[in-house]
Image: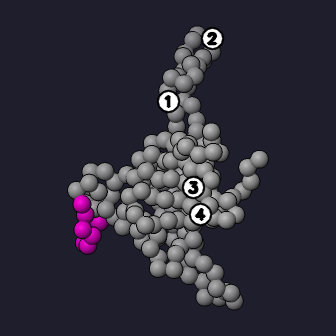
Amino acid sequence: MIHDTNSKIVIHKLKGVEIFAQTNSLPSISVIPIEIPTPQQKGYVPGGGGLEFSELSVDFIVDEDFNNYFSIVEWMYKANIANVPGAQYQVKREDIYNPCSDITLYLLNNNMEEYAAIDFVNAMPVNLGELSFNTNSAEPQPLKSNVTFRYDYFKRNNSPLFS
């Protein structure tokens, strides 16, 4: 039986950046059937129209140096460099022509050891949530944000969980 678990996201394009997820879920998949019109009623052929994947949304803790948050900000800027006025980032040619990156979602046990992995192929951030600074809290709270990715598809990585 699988229980709720810890997880982290590794973005292959952002070397050394790990995002420890607070909440995330494996996105849904829909089959797009092909409609076959008939005089009496509509018919459908399953699987002919392809698959549609929902977005990957991750709530995460921002690290104390803001490294994970601003690495995603820079990635989004580089992917949209033509639309960012006064952009100060050094952009490599491969960032302009290929703003996507594979992402791996690692499921972690209670000892924070990886025991399963899911790969999201050709992902790109499409939304990065706000950071709310709350000075009214009696106890210090970690900063949290949300990032949403679009991707081509996901697949299981070779792991014992999915064998």
Q: What SS does tag 1 mark?
A: loop
Bin the neighbour count of mark 2 within 10 Å (Cα to Cα): few under 14, some 14-19, many 20 and up.
Answer: few
Mark 4 vs mark 3, CA separation in Å: 10 Å
Q: What SS does tag 3 mark?
A: strand
Mark 3 vs mark 2, CA separation in Å: 49 Å
Q: Amino acid at mark 3?
A: Tyr
| Between discs 3 and 2, the one toward the N terminus | 2
| Between discs 4 and 1, the one toward the N terminus | 4
Q: What SS does tag 4 mark?
A: strand
Bin the neighbour count of mark 1 within 10 Å (Cα to Cα): few under 14, some 14-19, many 20 and up.
Answer: few
Mark 4 vs mark 1, CA separation in Å: 30 Å
| Between discs 2 and 1, the one toward the N terminus | 2
The stretch in magenta equals 84-92
Which residue is denoted by mark 1 in the rendering? 50
Give the residue furthest to the top: 39
Which residue is denoted by mark 2 in the rendering? 40
Query: In the rendering, at what x and y percent does residue 78 appear?
Result: 31, 62
Q: Amino acid at mark 2?
A: Gln
Q: Mark 4 or 3, which is nearer the eye?
A: 3
